[in-house]
């Protein structure tokens, strides 16, 4: 009997990233109309609200709230560039599962970090955790793809992903750019790695070594 954790979905491609991008844009517009403070109060992941009010839905909804135009623009641009290819490779149902599982677990991991460091009122927002997971998936599926970082520096996709991981680790330890949720980004990478190991039996390192 097949392990249910590895049972594949029937392949179907529905371009669901455009629905995800559209929902992010709608939430951003709601922030402009009703005020970011009001919207983020109910949708951002705030440890104190999870603990005292049981707002567990924010482990999902935090991915759709963004802190300003540049935040949502770069996240949605990265989702469009990498997500379209990953969704086409995985299929839409698998992609949705991958996106929300990695994003939600990145939120849970961040909650644990904030809880044990006493940062109860930090508002976690943004799709970056899930998007970092998507970037890892892209590097696994397309290891020979060349990404021009900042439109200038050509890097193979695995090199880009490992480089970003190293930077996030350095930033999280040193506190550089401390308004950025570096632990959430690292968690996105980590849970994507585990997803491929458990769901697909793919070890990214071994897959890259075979190239």
Image (spheres, rainbow, N blue to C red):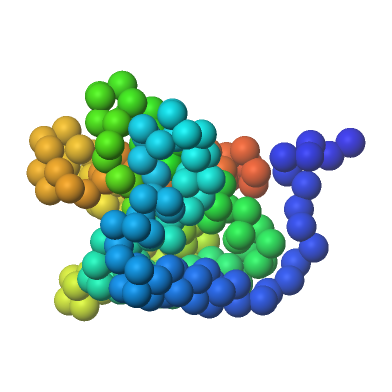
Residue 158 horizontal/vertical position (percent): 36, 56
Query: Which of the 4 image quadrants contains residue 187?
Result: top left
Residue for point 31% across, 73% down: 32
The residue nearer to you, when weighing 155 against 94, is: 94
Question: In the rendered view, does 153 fall on the left or right side of 57?
Answer: left
Q: Quick check: 123 above or below 173?
A: below
Residue for point 30% across, 45% down: 123
Query: Which of the 4 image quadrants contains residue 169?
Result: top left
Residue 27 horizontal/vertical position (percent): 43, 68
Question: In the rendered view, does 201 fall on the left or right side of 62?
Answer: right
* Residue placed furthest toward the top: 116
Q: Is residue 126 visible?
A: no
Query: Which of the 4 image quadrants contains residue 157?
Result: bottom left
Circle count: 0
Residue for point 21% across, 49% down: 180
Q: Quick check: 145 above or below 198?
A: below
Question: In the rendered view, does 183 fall on the left or right side of 203?
Answer: left
Residue 135 horizontal/vertical position (percent): 41, 59
Residue for point 48% across, 53% down: 61
The residue nearer to you, when weighing 91 against 162, is: 91
The residue nearer to you, when weighing 205 against 83, is: 83
Q: Is residue 134 visible?
A: yes
| Position of the N terminus by quadrant | top right
Question: In the rendered view, does 198 fall on the left or right side of 106?
Answer: right
Residue 85 horizontal/vertical position (percent): 52, 72
Q: Quick check: 159 above or below 88?
A: above
* Residue placed furthest toward the right: 1
């Amino acid at each position: 009997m097949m392990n249910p954790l590895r049972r594949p979905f029937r392949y179907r491609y529905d371009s669901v990233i455009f629905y995800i991008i559209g929902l992010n844009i709608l939430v951003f517009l709601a922030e402009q109309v009703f005020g970011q403070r009001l919207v983020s109060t109910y949708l951002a992941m705030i440890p104190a609200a999870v603990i005292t009010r049981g707002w567990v839905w924010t482990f999902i909804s935090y991915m759709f709230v963004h802190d300003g135009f540049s935040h949502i623009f770069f996240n949605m641009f990265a989702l469009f560039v990498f997500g379209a290819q990953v969704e086409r490779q995985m299929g839409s149902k698998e992609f949705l599962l991958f996106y929300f599982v990695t994003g939600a677990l990145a939120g849970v991991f961040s909650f644990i970090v904030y809880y044990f460091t006493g940062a109860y009122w930090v508002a976690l927002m943004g799709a970056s955790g899930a998007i970092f997971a998507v970037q890892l998936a892209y590097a696994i599926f397309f290891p020979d793809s060349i990404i021009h970082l900042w439109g200038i520096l050509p890097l193979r996709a695995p090199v880009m992903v490992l480089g970003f991981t190293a930077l996030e680790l350095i930033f999280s330890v040193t506190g550089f750019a401390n308004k950025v949720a570096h632990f959430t980004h690292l968690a996105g990478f980590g849970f994507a790695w585990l997803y491929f190991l458990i769901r697909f039996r793919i070890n990214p390192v071994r897959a890259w070594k075979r190239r």
